[in-house]
């Protein structure tokens, strides 16, 4: 019995101690913690920079050939030979295909024969004119001596005029025969298809072959599509907010998925003077040197352009920005190194994890980690300093 009583007394004492401890814990939890008056808040800070920062924008675009043309046959016929194929290099004036020319060779021979006939007719007409002119002179001499009559003179004169007109007609026939001969010769030359273009470089590349040897093609039927690959053109579109900051000659950096580690430099060559009504965007064309022809038309690219640059800017890390009461700001570490002060700022350009800020008293160091626990004047414990990263 005695043991039971002692056990009950012990349990009562344990319960009383537990109740007192619980009450004290609740009282401690209900008391507000005064920041800055108790334990300092651990934070990380970074040095505020002054320097240059750029406003860059990256646009999605597509590569396009600077120039392209479709090589077509000017005359119809059977394609006998094709001297180039897909991806082959073509120089200006190079013969790239040959058509069957048998009919055209025969047409030239026939035209030459017709010209020869016209030349013979002209010679005959000229001889008859000479005879008529001699006859007219003889009749005029006889008329002067009173031997020939006026009617004989008129007949001789009419004959002379008729022969002269016949000479002019045969000369015209000869000119027509020569023109026909030249036309047949031109058509014969057209059986050798030549890649000729104006402007640009001396070399282009076959982008597409549209026929095969042995095909019968019609006049003006396309045979090949050839493109100029250097320089190549990057085409992208910009909205109104960026349009005013772009101009001809501005530098552009290109990246493509085909060469993820490479950066290709170019310059804006053309800025469209109008916007598309359906997208409210303007077309921008940048030319990029492509001597090694790694870049191909149709590739997807990302074009980065520096729209603006500030040379003497106050720069802090992105992580330093905090938004409180609908305002942006930073916590600046005081001169004592143990308290922080809230400073309202206006963010500006962003680049590589850095941001330009405008405001009063942004010097020294700013908090980059731990701001959620801070108020103006809070006591802090600086765990690390770091410099604003540059790239």
Image (cartoon, rainbow, N blue to C red):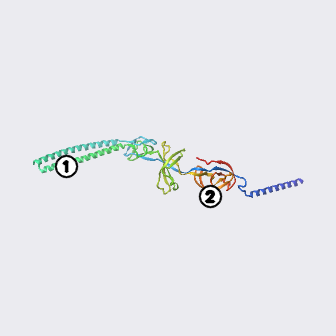
Q: Secondary structure at mark 2?
A: strand
Determine the image quadrant of residue 21.
bottom right
The answer, for residue 137, to whether it is visible in the render is yes
- Residue drawn at the location 64% of the way across and 49% of the way down: 46
The answer, for residue 96, to whether it is visible in the render is no
Label 1 vs 2, first from the N-terminus: 1
Q: Closer to the camera: disc 1 or disc 2? A: 2
> What's the distance in space between the residues labelled 1 and 2, CA to CA?
107 Å
Determine the image quadrant of residue 109.
top left
> Residue 175 at x, y = what percent?
27, 46
- Residue drawn at the location 62% of the way across and 58% of the way down: 327
Residue furthest to the left in view is 146
Q: Which label belongs to residue 161? A: 1
Q: Which label belongs to residue 337? A: none
Q: Secondary structure at mark 1?
A: helix
Left or right, 188 with respect to 59, comes to left
User: Number of callouts in the render?
Assistant: 2
Q: Which label belongs to residue 327? A: 2
Determine the image quadrant of residue 93.
top left
> Residue 70 at x, y = what percent?
42, 47
């Amino acid at each position: 019995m005695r043991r039971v009583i002692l056990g009950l007394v012990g349990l009562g004492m344990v319960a009383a101690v537990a109740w007192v401890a619980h009450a004290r814990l609740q009282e401690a939890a209900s008391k507000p913690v005064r920041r800055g008056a108790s334990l300092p808040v651990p934070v990380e800070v970074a040095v505020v920079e002054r320097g240059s920062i750029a406003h860059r924008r990256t646009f999605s675009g597509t590569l396009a050939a600077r120039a392209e043309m479709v090589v077509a046959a000017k005359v119809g016929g059977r394609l006998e030979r094709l001297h180039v194929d897909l991806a082959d290099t073509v120089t200006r004036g190079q013969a790239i295909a040959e058509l069957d020319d048998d009919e055209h060779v025969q047409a030239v021979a026939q035209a030459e024969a017709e010209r020869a006939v016209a030349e013979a007719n002209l010679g005959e007409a000229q001889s008859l004119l000479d005879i008529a002119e001699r006859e007219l002179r003889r009749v005029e001499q006889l008329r002067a001596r009173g031997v020939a009559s006026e009617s004989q003179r008129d007949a001789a004169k009419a004959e002379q005029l008729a022969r002269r007109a016949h000479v002019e007609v045969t000369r015209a026939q000869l000119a027509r025969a020569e023109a026909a001969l030249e036309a047949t010769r031109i058509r014969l030359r057209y059986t050798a298809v030549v890649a000729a273009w104006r402007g640009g470089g001396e070399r282009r590349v076959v982008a597409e072959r549209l026929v095969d040897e042995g095909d019968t093609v019609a006049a003006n039927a396309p045979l090949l599509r050839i493109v100029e690959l250097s320089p190549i053109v990057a085409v992208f579109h910009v909205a109104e907010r960026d349009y005013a900051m772009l101009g001809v000659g501005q530098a552009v950096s290109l990246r493509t998925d085909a060469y993820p580690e490479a950066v290709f430099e170019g310059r804006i060559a053309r800025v469209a003077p109008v916007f598309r009504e359906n997208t409210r965007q303007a077309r921008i064309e940048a030319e990029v040197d492509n001597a090694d022809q790694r870049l191909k038309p149709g590739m997807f690219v990302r074009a980065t352009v520096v729209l603006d640059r500030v040379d003497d800017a106050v720069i802090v890390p992105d992580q330093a920005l905090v938004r409180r009461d609908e305002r942006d700001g930073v916590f600046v570490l005081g001169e004592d190194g143990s308290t922080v002060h809230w400073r309202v700022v206006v963010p500006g350009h962003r680049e590589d994890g850095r941001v330009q800020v405008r405001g009063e008293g942004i010097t020294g160091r700013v908090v980059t980690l731990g701001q959620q626990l801070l108020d103006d004047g809070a006591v802090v414990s600086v765990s690390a300093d770091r410099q604003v990263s540059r790239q």
